Amino acid sequence: MIPTAGVADAHRHLLRALGGLTDADVGAPTALPGWTRGHVLAHVTDAGRALADLVEHAGRGVLIPLYDPATHDRDGIIEATADRTADEHRNALREHSERLEVAWSRVADWDQPVNYRDGKLSSTVFARWREVWIHAVDVGAATPADWPGDFCEHAVDFLKERLPHDAIVTGPPRALAAWLSGRDTGDGLTGDLPELGPWPGGRPRSGDAR
């Protein structure tokens, strides 16, 4: 099942939680190296824009990369928009999230090819699901306790590649998802917790949650 409704719920949760965000809050640091809350919000917002572009082009039979360096400087956009006011962050996040949801509503074939991850349009939905819920923790808009159960199971399945092949770590899906995503220390899990490997598909930049 493609969790478009789950992503919409994540969007709504994040936007509700950001309702009291102030301009001062935007500049507060996060656990992501060198990133303020504004950097994280700028990243989540522009990722929504990039995914919407990808999905809309796919609907026209055109394959584009998620980030085309010739037209979109991913890191430059984040730096340029991190210092938006709280209202500007909320409005931009709402705009691009709604645009992405509309683009998905027009999809007839989730196996349609895209130039992204496993090459299927469905991967854009799962990527956004992870991105919104995980980064909601980074900006203080959620804790892993807020993550839906089906999201936790998906996150564990996606992130288990970070475990060394000989490692055996057990525990509830929520606790495993929080630890594997780097958003919890792993208290309550059973087994010798190893050093986690790279994010699936590589994780060259601190803001990536896909």
Image (spheres, grey):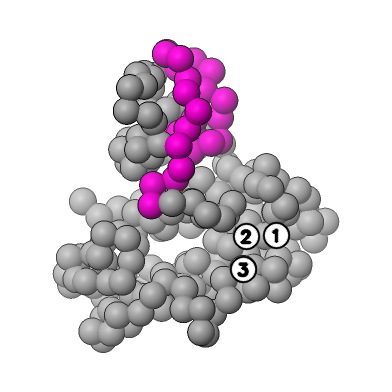
Residue 150 makes an appearance in the image = no
Q: What residue type is labelled 1?
A: Gly
Q: How crowded is mark 1: few (under 14 residues within 10 Å), some or many (20 or more)?
A: many
Q: Label for residue 75?
A: 3
Q: How crowded is mark 2: few (under 14 residues within 10 Å), some or many (20 or more)?
A: many
Q: What residue type is labelled 3?
A: Asp
Name the residue that disc number 2 marks: 41
- The quarter holding residue 87 reads bottom right
Picture layout, residue 70 above or below residue 26:
below
Determine the main secondary structure of the stretch shown in magenta: loop
- Residue at 39% in and 47% down: 200
Q: Residue 79 in the image: x percent, y percent?
A: 70, 68
Mark 3 vs mark 1, CA separation in Å? 13 Å
How many numbered discs, if any?
3
- The quarter holding residue 138 reads top right
Residue 32 falls left or right of residue 62? right
Mark 2 vs mark 1, CA separation in Å? 5 Å
> Upstream in the sequence, badge 3 or badge 1?
1
Q: What residue type is labelled 2?
A: Leu
Give the magenta part as a residue range. Answer: 177-201
